[in-house]
Amino acid sequence: MRELPLLALLLCSCSLIDLIKAEEKPRLEIYPTQEVQRKPVGKPLILTCRPRVPEAALVADLQWRDNMNNTILPKPMGRNQPPMYTETLPGESLALMIPSLSVEMGGIYYCTASYANTEILEKAVTITTYVAITWTNAPENQYPTLGQEYVVMCEVKADPNPTIDWLRNGDPIRTGDKYVVENHGLRIRDVQESDEGIYTCRAAVIETGELLERTIRVEVFIQPMIVSLPADLEAVEGKPFAANCTATGKPVPEISWIRDATQLNVATADRFQVNPQTGLVTISSVSQEDYGTYTCLAKNKAGVVDQKTKLNVLVRPQIYELYNVTGSRTKEIAITCRAKGRPAPAITFRRWGTQEEYSNGVQVDDNRIVLERNFDEERGESTGTLRISNAERSDDGLYQCIARNKGADAYKTGHITVEFAPDFSQMKDLPPVFSWEQRKANLSCLAMGIPNATIEWHWNGLKVKDMSDPNLKIVGTGPRSDLIVHPVTRKYYTSYKCIATNIHGTAEHDMQLKEARVPDFVAAAAPRQLTATTMTFDIRGPPTELGLPILAYSVQYKEVYNPDWSTAYNRSWSPDSPYIVEGLRPQTEYSFRFAARNQVGLGNWGVNQQQSTPRRSAPEEPKPLHNPVQHDREEPVVVSPYSDHFELRWGVPADNGEPIDKYQIKYCPGVKISGTWTELENNCNTVEVVETTSFEMTQLNGNTYYRIELKAHNAIGYSSPASIIMKTTRGIDVIQVAERPVLSSAAIVGIAVGGVLLLLFVVDLLCCVTVHMGVMATMCRRAKRSPSEIDDEAKLGSLYGWRFPLPYCSGQLVKEPPPSPLPLPPPVKLGGSPMTSPLDEKEPLRTPTGSIKQNSTIEFDGRFVHSRSGEIIGKNSAV
């Protein structure tokens, strides 16, 4: 029963629907349903036409017509999209597609269709267009430049026209001195960094109620500025190089380097690297071709700035041209030197072997000489010319060209040759040529001249080469020529003329050939120093000719009682040596005669004189071999190089007839008070030395004066003392710490040996006293001799007497002389003189056994005297 009402309700609903469909009228509907569609230009639009009919299948020819009543076609396949087209949608709808509205598209559009082929359906819609607020030129980020005027662009398009206002950081902006609101933007005068911020451009259309804002970020840019770039840069060839071009700006500028000669960015070149952020340019290895001008370019969005710099490549100088030159005397001579380098080197000259360089321009000390310089900095070349006007012979020689720049110095040597006529000035002072005994003579003629001169010889006005004289022979024709003359007769001892000729002139020189002779008599010979065994003479020679010097002086001497000069002694000396005759007898009168020798031979003997030697005496005073290095008023002072020792050296003095057997040295410390020497007698030391000419004084005090006395001794006695003052240097005092004496095993052995020797000495002494035997008895017998023997030994100064004194032996100990033992050897002689009794001075000197009379020669080399046996036949001069 419940189901019947429900079924009845359903039947009623269906009947109602059928009734509604039967009453609905066919029509078309356009969506959106507003009859007027107001849309902005540039926006897309879709209008959909949908039939409202009972039977959709009866709808035909559904289409859209535009504002010109033209049918709008569907979108064609594969073609460009038309301004408008139709497109069928699901549900039997037809859509009008307009991708972008334009003002021209405004108007009435119709949607039409036929229904059941009997009814035409149509629906109209009006499209009204307007221009919406559109930002045509309003970038969201804008960058004004510091210090300039700038317009923050905000160009707006709308229809109807919009109104524009500005805000900065949310605050409204009013037109004033700083800001001016214009149609196309906001003008900012004298832009500063404080003008940065967020600007809002606001556009409003009152008619449409449209409002739109544009946020613009303003950041102030700063134009680039190069703050560090030297006007000139220097690089060394072959070395790496780096340079900075520092620039500031906002944003950070990008830096590039442009080579002006090629207008290329060096970042693309070999060996170059550029850091665009820092502006650092590096060259791995500098080449000469890198020389030139470069532009540093700094660029950012605010602008571009550039600055030029010049890169000078320091190329070490190289002299590539310097030729030897030749000129004539009294003419101008110029020598040119060319060099290259970076920078162009400065060129100068100097004479070889000197350090003084010629200055640019006229020389102060010689206005004949001018130095000219020329520079080509672009090519790195320079030229230097040294001009010498009125050239002289002294200008001839080597000249050194010096090319100098910051890189280094270069040197090259050239020669200036000054040609001149022949000249014999170097021969004007030459001595004549000598010959004797028909010896051949060589007359050498040397002509100075450039070019070399040709030489001819003339004799008595005739050319020698045309005379065919066998005694005249020419060797060489120039610049040296020798005339060999064989003077077989005296006519050849005459003058010969040497004539030299070259392209600049002729010169003559006369040469003399003279006959040489032996020297004349010696002018004078006087004894200057006498000892018992020597004589020293002063000799004044005969006059000499230039070129024929005295080569030696000779002396013959013999005892006065000997009338035969053939048995006399001979001695010769070179002219510059001491004239000393040695080996004479004391207290003996001698005859002397002297002669001079040259290249020809020995001259005549002359200056005959007699001279006696004195008696034997003590030696001469020895001469210390020390040079004083400081002086005070009384006497020189010798400074020792050491503080604690000093070596005294002396020369052997004349022994005056008795050999020197010893030297006595006494040295005492002392001081000088008011110029008076005061010795410390208690500290004096006295020593005696034999067979030596030096003695080392030890254990001296530093920085102390010592008076040193040196005496020589022979059998006669002591010489007068030679005295010097010596000063030691300042030394360092050494403090020695005394150690406890420790008796070593060696000391013990020494003491034992000493005890044994003492015991033997006592036993030997007892034997000597009791039985006259033993070592001491033998020595006592030797000591006990006759008075004459003792006196002779004392006179002779026997070495045994002073070397071995016998304090324990005397005559009282010996009762009778025992037999003499084997004969002792003869006394040792320290000197060269024979040993005789000093009391018997007239006894002739004894000639050593087996010796004969000998001639000798004395030569002096400036330091030492050399004695040679034998007669000199000829001697060259040492001069």
Image (spheres, rainbow, N blue to C red):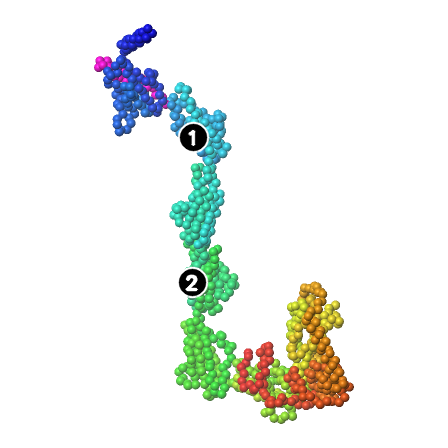
Residue 225, position as x, y percentages in the image: 47, 41
On screen, residue 255 above or below 644: above
Q: Nearer the viewer, mark 2 or mark 1?
A: 1
Q: Residue at x 41, y 23 (%)?
A: 162
Q: Amino acid at mark 1?
A: Glu
Region rendered in magenta? 111-131
> Image quarter for residue 634?
bottom right
Q: Which residue is mark 1?
A: 140
On screen, residue 874 above or below 186: below
Left or right: where 510 falls relative to 653:
left
Q: Dot 1 surroundings within 10 Å: few (below 14), some, or many (20 or more)? A: some
Q: Which residue is mark 2?
A: 322
SS under mark 1: loop
Q: CA distance from mark 2 to mark 1?
A: 74 Å
> Image quarter for residue 76?
top left
> Image quarter for residue 43?
top left
Left or right: where 834 falls relative to 406:
right
Residue 581, position as x, y percentages in the image: 62, 84
Residue 129, position as x, y percentages in the image: 34, 21
Residue 610, position as x, y percentages in the image: 65, 88
Q: Which quadrant would the N terminus be assigned to in this image?
A: top left
Q: Which quadrant would the C terminus be assigned to in this image?
A: bottom right
